[in-house]
Every structure is written in C-alpha cells, then in structure tokens.
C-alpha cells in the first residue's frame, strides 16, 4: 500500500502525475484493485466521471473495494482520487493545447506570440458574430428596467464589472454581481421587465446556472456571452456565442479568449447606444463633462470613456 500523502505540495505532485503513481503501485495491488487500476489507466476520462456504482459494475468488483481503492493508491479516498484525476487530466490537456503555442514564431518574440493569438481570436469571433442574437440582446437590454450582470472567477467576473462600466454610462440601471450568494438572491428579485446578462468562459459554474434558472422562473430575459455548447447556453433566451478554445496558446500565456468576449461586449454596448439614440448621447456628454474638471479636455478622448 502506498504511503498516504500530506495535502500540501505532495498532493499537487500527485495531481500532475497521478497515472504514473498508479502504475508504480500496480504490482503491489490486490487482484481486485488491479482491475480498478487497469480501468483507470485505460480510460482515465471515463473513470473521472464515473460513480462508485458504475466503477463497480465495469470492473466487476464490490463497491466497498472501489471505495477502498482510493486509499490503497495513496489518496484519502475515492472522492479524493477522482478530484486528483480530474486535476491531472486538466493539466495534461492544458499542456497538450499549449504545444503549438510554445513553438516560436519566425520573430521568436513572446510579444509576437501574444499578438497573433489575440488577432486570431478576434478575427475568428468577428467572422462568426451572431448578429441576430446580438440584436435581440441589445433590444432587450435597451428596454429593461434593470440589468443584472453575472460573472464568477477569473476574467469572467472582471468582464461582468466591465459590462456594468459600459452600461451605466448609457443611464441603464445595472448592477454586476460576482458573489455566488448575491447572484442567487438578486436573480430571485427579477421580473419580466428585467434582463439577466451572464459572462462565462465555460458556461458551467453552478452559481450562474442556478441564477439563470431563477431569473428565467421569475420572467426575466436571460442573455449569456458564453460557449453555445455549454450548459448555461442551453438554458437561456439569447446566447452570444464565444467558443471556448485555447488551442495553440502556451499554458503560461493568458488566454486570448477574453479579447473575443470584450469584442462582443463592446459591439453589444455600441448597438444599445445606437438604439437609445439621443438619450444615450445626452448621458454620455454629461458623464464626459463630469470628469473634465479633473483632468481638463483631452484631445480625441472617446466620449464613451
């Protein structure tokens, strides 16, 4: 039996090379544990999503044996094993995706790599911008009494606040929520005159899915800037598709997907301003004038900033 690790750097190392660890302890495992280990090594993705009952049925061993297997390979238990396996698979995928991105371009410059990655993302998104969906979203937001904007974790939360930063300048009553509790609570206050706008790279966070369900239940129009193949996209009224992809991006390079998300946000806000017409123009001028005394008149400063 492998020595149970402490949950510090050792756990991180297990996540990065879990399959090697299982191969290492394989000869010392019992006959039943070897069946489970072989299933894990042959089909790690399937194993990561399987329940104790499913692993038991596939390997023809008892459920109790499956539960003990995690401890027998050095984890705290079966659940801990699955978490480490999922982390391992995520790390493997990240490095696989980054292989092309790690290849130096002709200039050999990291600046060149970042620039080209961003340019590719923007071009790809611009070619596939869902204009019909964009119009539906813009129309709904321009007529809404309230717009609640939701994002969680990493760049999505930051982008949610950026949407608020853009919309309030058009005198739209809007609030960004990045706390999971506030997301659910605010969604429960919505009605048919409101819009819930979600920003999510993966379209999978539970708090966003729950908030979308609540907002929809209470009659709000739901809009999402997310991957159209995600769980979130399947449960909202309007999806502004930004595909989840990091192919060709080095694992240590910021994902250029956020440039695509910003492009969609800027296009959406620009269209909303067009729909609001003089109302938006008047508000933008007032906003611009309010900060002029702080830094004076800056030539060519966009009125929207």
Image (spheres, grey):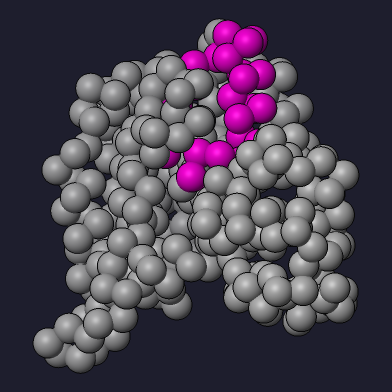
Residue 101 occupies which quadrant of the picture?
bottom left
Please report the residue visible at 60 percent of the width from the left and 53 percent of the height from the top.
39
Along the line of sight, the residue nearer the viewer: 85 or 204: 85
From this view, report whether residue 7 is shown above or below residue 227. Answer: below
Q: Please provide the residue range marked out in magenta.
A: 202-226
Residue 271 occupies which quadrant of the picture?
top left
Residue 35 position in % (x across, y down): 67, 54
On the picture, is 226 further left or further right than 173? Answer: left
From this view, report whether residue 90 is shown above or below residue 220. Answer: below
User: Can residue 297 be seen in this snapshot?
Assistant: no
User: Can residue 291 be seen in this snapshot?
Assistant: yes
From this view, report whether residue 16 is shown above or below residue 281. Answer: below
29 within the magenta span: no
On the picture, is 23 further left or further right than 275? Answer: right
Residue 22 position in % (x across, y down): 67, 70
From this view, report whether residue 298 is shown above or below residue 83. Answer: below
Q: Quadrant of the C terminus?
A: bottom left
Residue 70 position in % (x across, y down): 80, 59
Please report the residue visible at 19 percent of the width from the left and 50 percent of the height from the top.
124
Along the line of sight, the residue nearer the viewer: 164 or 201: 201
């Amino acid at each position: 039996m492998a020595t149970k690790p402490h949950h510090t750097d050792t756990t991180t190392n297990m996540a990065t090379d879990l399959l090697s660890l299982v191969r290492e302890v394989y000869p010392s495992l019992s006959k039943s544990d070897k069946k489970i280990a072989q299933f894990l090594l042959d089909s790690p993705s399937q194993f990561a999503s399987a329940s104790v009952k499913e692993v038991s049925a596939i390997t023809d061993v008892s459920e109790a044996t499956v539960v003990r297997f995690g401890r027998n390979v050095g984890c705290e238990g079966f659940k801990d094993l699955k978490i480490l396996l999922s982390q391992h698979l995520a790390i493997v995928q990240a490095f696989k995706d980054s292989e092309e991105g790690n290849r130096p371009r002709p200039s050999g410059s990291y600046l060149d790599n970042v620039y080209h990655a961003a340019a590719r993302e923007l071009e790809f998104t611009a070619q596939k911008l869902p204009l019909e969906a964009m119009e539906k979203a813009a129309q709904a937001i321009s007529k809404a009494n309230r717009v609640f904007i939701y994002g969680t974790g990493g760049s999505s939360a930051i982008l949610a606040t950026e949407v608020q930063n853009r919309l309030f300048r058009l005198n739209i009553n809007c609030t960004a929520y990045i706390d999971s509790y506030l997301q659910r609570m605010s969604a429960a206050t919505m009605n048919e005159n409101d819009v819930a706008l979600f920003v999510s790279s993966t379209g999978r966070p539970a708090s966003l899915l729950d908030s979308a369900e609540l907002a929809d239940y209470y009659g709000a129009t739901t809009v999402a800037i997310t991957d159209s193949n995600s769980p979130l996209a399947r449960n909202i009224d309007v999806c502004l598709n930004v595909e989840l992809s990091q192919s060709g991006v080095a694992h240590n390079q910021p994902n250029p997907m956020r440039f695509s998300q910003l492009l969609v946000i800027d296009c959406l806000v620009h269209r909303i301003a067009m729909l609001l017409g003089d109302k938006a123009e008047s508000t933008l001028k007032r906003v611009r004038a309010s900060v002029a005394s702080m830094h004076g008149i800056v030539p060519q400063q966009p009125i929207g900033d």
